Amino acid sequence: MDIEKFTDDVYTVAEKLSAGQSPEIKSKINFVRERLIELYQKNLVKINHSVLEIICASNLISQGYAVDIEKHLSDILVCDLFAIKGDGTFIMEIETGFTPPDHALDTIDYYIARISSKIARYSQHCSKFALATPVVGILPIPRLFLKPPSKRSKDEIQNIKELVDRFYKNPPIEISDILNARLHSVYLINIDKCFAKQIDPYTYIELTAKLQEASELDL
C-alpha cells in the first residue's frame, strides 16, 4: 500500500475536476476525494477504480446530486456511487470488464451474468440506476433490460436467471428482480480527459450492436 502515491493521484484528478467550478461543487468533489483516501487506508479501494469513481461522482455533483461512494445497501450489497437529489436516489456501478482467473474459460458468460446481476439487484434500491464503463470497453447489456416488464417473456427472464445462477448463488437472484429491473443510463468515462458522458441505454446498444454481432454475442 502506497498511501502517498494514491493521495497524490487522487488529488491530481480532483484538482482537474474542480477547475473552474463553484466553491460548493469543489467542496463536494473534495469530500469524495477524502472519502477515497479513507477507504484506501482501509484497503477497500484501488487507484484505478478510485479514479473512475471520482470522475463519475464529479459528473453527478455537477448535476446537483449529493454523492457518497462505496455505500452499503444491505449486508452483502455495496454500490460504487450513491447519489441523492431532492426525493430521488441514483446508484451507479462502474464496470471495467475485469474477470477473475477462475473464469478464464467462460469470461463472456461471466461478464454478462455480472452485468445482469447488478442491474437486477441494484436497481431495486434506487429511483434511477446506471452503469458506467471506460470508453475502451463494451458493456454486454442484455436487451431484456430495455423492455418494459410487461414485454419481458418468461423464457427471456428464465434464461437470464439461469445464467446469473451459474455464477452468483449467494443469494440466488429472484425472478421478480429480473422482471422489475431497470437501467436508466450508461456513462462512458474518458479517463485521460477526466470526464464522463451520459447516454441512454438504447443508444448505447445501437452504437455497440455491430461490435457485439461481430463478436457473436447473443444478447
Image (cartoon, rainbow, N blue to C red):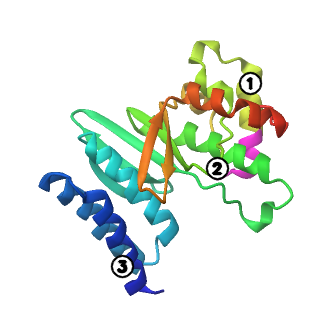
Q: CA distance from mark 3 to mark 2?
A: 26 Å
> Is residue 35 a member of the stretch shown in magenta?
no
Q: Given contact means CB atoms under 8 Å apart, are the residues at marks 1 and 2 in contact? A: no
Choose between 183 and 78: the one closer to the eye: 183
The answer to whether residue 168 is magenta is yes
| Residue 24 spot, x, y in % from top left | 14, 53
Instruction: Name, please, the residue furthest toward the top.
Output: 150
- Measured as percent of width and height from the top left, residue 80 is found at 44, 54
Distance, label 1 to label 2, CA atoms, is 25 Å
Label disc, if present, on residue 8 of the rendered structure: 3
Q: Which residues are magenta?
A: 163-170
CA neighbours of label 1 inside 10 A, class few (<14), some (14 to 19), many (20+)? some
198 or 67, which lies in front? 198
Q: Secondary structure at mark 1?
A: helix
Q: Residue at the spot x=79%, y=65% of the render?
A: 102
Amino acid at circle 3:
Asp
Residue at point 57%, 49% (across, down): 135
Residue at position x 21%, y 34% in the image = 86
Residue matched to label 2: 137
Residue 71 shows up from this direction:
no
Q: Earlier in the sequence, mark 1 or mark 2?
A: 2
State the residue position of label 1. 156
